[in-house]
Image: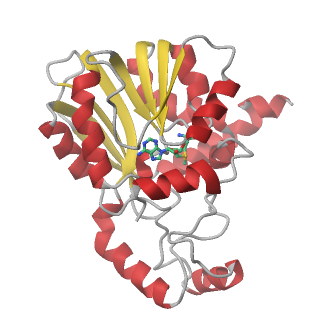
Amino acid sequence: MPTIGWNKKVWDSEYNWDAGGDEWSGTWGGSDMHWYGSILPRIHCFLPAATILEIGPGYGRWSQYLKENCDNLIVLDISDKCIQACKERFKSSSNIQYIVNDGSSLDMILDGSVDFIFSFDSLVHAEDDVMSGYIDQFSRILKEDGAGFIHHSNLGEYRRYFSLLRWLLSKLSLSTEREGSGRSINDDGSGISGTLQKIAFSLAGNMIIDRSHLRALSMTADKFNRYAEDAGLQCVGQEIINWGSKRLIDCFSTFTVKGSRWQRDNILVRNGAYMKEAGSILNASRLYSSSSFK
Ligand SMILES: C[S@@+](CC[C@H](N)C(=O)[O-])C[C@H]1O[C@@H](n2cnc3c(N)ncnc32)[C@H](O)[C@@H]1O
């Protein structure tokens, strides 16, 4: 399972960051299409915000847009390498504060100082202990009308399926990750040759086998909602989505401080068409993406 140590090791040293994370937006036709077509529509109500905290910026795939939508952007990452890359990339921007943390602490963020907390494609690899620890601290750092949007794992909803699948595949020395899925690191780093894997997956005809995309197996949308409640926060929207998978293994949780202007009952949506949406954005990218003009 992805521990804090695993995340630090992978993102700080093993992963090849040559494409800066843009490689993960190919399904949407590029990072700009991904941001404007998929992410911004989901968070636009909260922008611009005076102070934004981004957890897990990587090489700044979303920070490049967030920094244009706030007075102060705080980027916080477990990986020193990522924070150094962001410093270099955004050296001409004067509104960014950079923090390397231990993968769990927000101690360096002042009480009641943040308007909007954002994390996308990063905490999907965080297990429930890390998520509950972060959520617990959100209530301290948020302002009265503060809110947040966090992309996290819902793999735990299918715990039995993926535990069984991982066990079966480990017996065959295979992995629940498939080559070419974008993240080249196997679940346990011990997957065997891509050819064998491809044969096994095609034999299974993708009818039975689904990919876990290295998501945290202990995390679910329901747990996020409960942790938020325990921390004095209120989930106002949870969109449970598929992510290159048939099963709805991810979730976007939007939350706020209780009593804030954003408070409402939680709206829970199970969106199995998320990848279809990505397909439409990809189609549009031929006409509208910034790279289409190069
Ligand atoms: C897959 S990369 C995604 C980066 C960026 N969000 C993007 O979409 O391009 C995951 C990032 O999250 C960071 N990360 C993982 N676990 C973390 C944790 N517990 N606390 C802070 N950062 C974390 C990693 O160091 C890495 O930069």
Extreme residue toward the right, this view: 294
Q: Nearer the viewer, residue 11 or 54?
A: 11
Quadrant of res 284 = top right
When the figure is inspected, residue 179 is found, relative to residue 219, above or below; the finding is below
The residue located at (71%, 82%) in the rendering is: 195
Quadrant of res 105 = top left
Quadrant of res 272 = bottom left
Q: Can you give x and y, in whole percent of width and height, for residue 110 in the image?
A: 31, 18
When the figure is inspected, residue 244 is found, relative to residue 35, above or below; the finding is below
The residue located at (46%, 65%) in the rendering is: 212
Q: How is the image coloured?
A: secondary structure
When the figure is inspected, residue 233 is found, relative to residue 125, above or below; the finding is above
Tally the marks. 0
The residue located at (54%, 55%) in the rendering is: 9
Q: Can you give x and y, in whole percent of width and height, for residue 285 in the image?
A: 70, 37
Q: Can you give x and y, in whole percent of width and height, for residue 242 in the image?
A: 44, 56
Q: Can you give x and y, in whole percent of width and height, for residue 101 in the image?
A: 43, 37
Left or right: 86 in relation to 223 = right
Of the 4 image quadrants, the one containing the C terminus is top right
Does any portion of residue 125 appear in the rendered image? yes
The residue located at (16%, 45%) in the rendering is: 226
Does any portion of residue 272 appear in the rendered image? no
